[in-house]
Amino acid sequence: MTNPIYSSLPTTIFEEMSGLAGALGAVNLGQGFPDDPGPEAIRAKAADAVLNGYNQYPRMAGAPELREAVAAHYGRAQGLDLDWQTEVTVTSGATEALASAFFGLLEPGDEVVVFQPFYDAYLPLIRRAGGVPRLVRLEPPHWRFDRAMLEAAFGPRTRFVVLNNPINPAGVVLPEADLALLAEFCVAHDAVAICDEVWEQVVFGDAVHRPLIGFPGMRERTVKIGSAGKMFGLTGWKVGWLCAAPELTHTLARAHQFLTFTTPPNLQSAVAWGLENSGDWFREMPQGLARSRDRLAEGLRREGFAVLASQGTYFLNVDLAASGIVEPDRDFALRAAREAGVASIPVSALYEQDPVTSILRLCFSKADATLDLGVERLARARELSRAAG
Ligand code: PMP
Ligand code: GLN
């Protein structure tokens, strides 16, 4: 009596691990969220908007002030020329933006190229929209794709590709050459790219995020998705957006109007204010996170763990096998939570076929003391794992 696309699914790994961490009082380096409350000035704007602002339905496509602020931000930060009136739609988080894109654009039988590991909402939404995922398997340590991998995945029925860049969980910011290669395939196959760029501002050091929509031939065939949750470290707010050429936007907005119709007006106006008054935020926020990344990486290395590079996102990956842990990632993650009091994300949960089972994702957007305690507990978990093995 139930639909197997959803009834056969486990609870998301993020909910499972945060649930375990809550129940056990474990340090939570699993689900990706900061443990500080987020920028106070933006929260103050939201509070003021709740008390003194407009609290009824905003416009379906989003508050004009936020749509304008999104277009202006991408003009400043990424050199894009979006028309806020015809090319920007506000959604309830990137997740609803993804759902609007899949439900609005896919037709039954369309093939959709998806890279794994993936953000776990992609496949159930694509299938519910009638799409057929064609998976490209990325693997550590570099998590890159090449021409042969794309040739194997793209075919005559390919209509879409879903790209997450910077990549969660890999922590990779794709170089220009890889994006140009993907753009070449999209143009050659007349495919639309659905680009989940929620991590676009969380990029460290010399790495540069380049939006696929800016590549030759992509301006009219890209749906660019962003989220205030990641831009401002306010993950619970669920304010996101879709940017696309007018024809795509028209259709996406029709899907969005029957999913959520709209997004809390007070949060929209606070995010608009944040984008217009960001000051040094987009320079300083990644610098602070890079310090946390380095603290976690150094602590782990001191304990003898093998750590992969992270150029962006809130995440650092540990190579379990190279760290002397023979257990598969999920078993180790459960042991670490239950027996050592530290929650993490086993990356195998983000594959559907032929999972990589030796990578553990850790979230470093946390206070120093939390990171240090996490390292101590992971070292303890490794001892317990060795003793058990
Ligand atoms: N895509 C990716 C790659 C993500 O990491 C996340 C959340 N961390 C989302 C989408 C969902 O974003 P939102 O919370 O704005 O729905
Ligand atoms: N994207 C977040 C992460 O990677 C989780 C979002 C969620 O829990 N749905 O941790």
Image (spheres, rainbow, N blue to C red):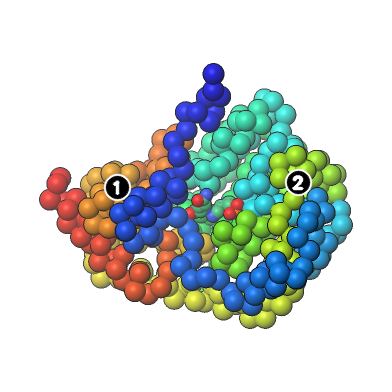
Residue that numbered label 1 is attached to:
334
**389 vs 342: above or below:** above
Report how far apart the C-alphas of labels 1 and 2 lie in the structure. 39 Å
Q: Quadrant of residue 211?
A: bottom right
At 22% from the left and 53% from the top, the residue drawn is: 339
Residue that numbered label 2 is attached to:
261
In this rendering, would 38 be left or right of 161?
left
In this rendering, would 21 be left or right of 279?
left
- 10 Å crowding of disc 1: few (<14), some (14-19), many (20+): many
Give the number of the mark in front: 1 or 2.
2
Q: Quadrant where the N terminus lies?
A: top right
The three-letter amino acid code for the residue at tag 2 is Phe
Callout 1 secondary element:
helix
Residue 61 showing in the rendered view: no
Q: Looking at the image, which is closer to me, 387 or 271?
A: 271
In this rendering, would 38 be left or right of 261?
left
At 60% from the left and 68% from the top, the residue drawn is: 232
Q: Looking at the image, which is closer to me, 368 or 49?
A: 49
Of the two numbered discs 1 and 2 on the same chain, state the one appearing first in sequence. Answer: 2
Q: Where in the figure is residue 239, as x and y percent of width and height?
A: 66, 57
